[in-house]
Amino acid sequence: DIAKEHTYLETLRRVLPVLREHGVKEVTVAFDGSGDSGSISSVEYDAVDFDGHDEVDVITSTSRFEAGRGWIRSHENSRKSINDAIHDLTYDYLDETGVDWYNEDGGYGELIINIVEGTVSLDVNVRVVNSEGMFYQERDITTDEIL
């Protein structure tokens, strides 16, 4: 049952044969986010002649909120380009991690699909800005006395 397993893995199972047919050995997806938004910045295939426009049947998942029931997730079959399928599976995998990589200072990382080994890895980094107080002084306005 697709509802019980990771949708991005099912998409990968459908995408891998097409990538293998085209001699792709690795796909690297870079993403970056901050300030309440985030996006995929690039999808790179190691096969020079592959453009990702081939289409494949995938399962698309959507979520909606229903009062009293919470978040309801549904799945449907659709036909997408490999590029779109890889974008979707990356966002699905990122969503599953629960890491907030797009708000405030945001984060970045990459997803790597190793077609030869049949593996996928996701590396998510979150930016943390530290601050250190360097000076503070309070003065009486009338006397110029340091308080």
Image (tube, rainbow, N blue to C red):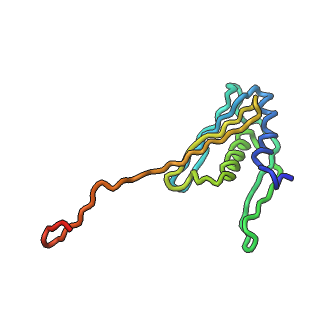
Asked if residue 57 lies left or right of residue 34, the reply is right
Quadrant the C terminus occupies = bottom left
Q: Nearer the viewer, residue 134 or 58?
A: 134
Q: Residue at x 76, y 25 (%)?
A: 23
Report the number of discs: 0
Q: Residue at x 61, y 52 (%)?
A: 99
Q: Nearer the viewer, residue 117 or 26?
A: 117
Kindly give the residue lying farthest to the left in the view shown.
143
Q: Residue at x 76, y 28 (%)?
A: 116
Above or below residue 138? Residue 87 is above
Question: Residue 109's x, y, as percent?
Answer: 58, 42
Q: Nearer the viewer, residue 82 or 69?
A: 69
Q: Nearer the viewer, residue 40 or 121?
A: 121
Kindly give the residue lying farthest to the right in the view shown.
1
| Residue 118 image-quadrant placement | top right
Q: Residue at x 27, y 56 (%)?
A: 135
Question: Residue 16's x, y, as percent?
Answer: 79, 35
Above or below residue 72? Residue 45 is above
Above or below residue 103? Residue 125 is above
Question: Residue 137's x, y, as percent?
Answer: 24, 62
Question: Residue 2's x, y, as percent?
Answer: 83, 52
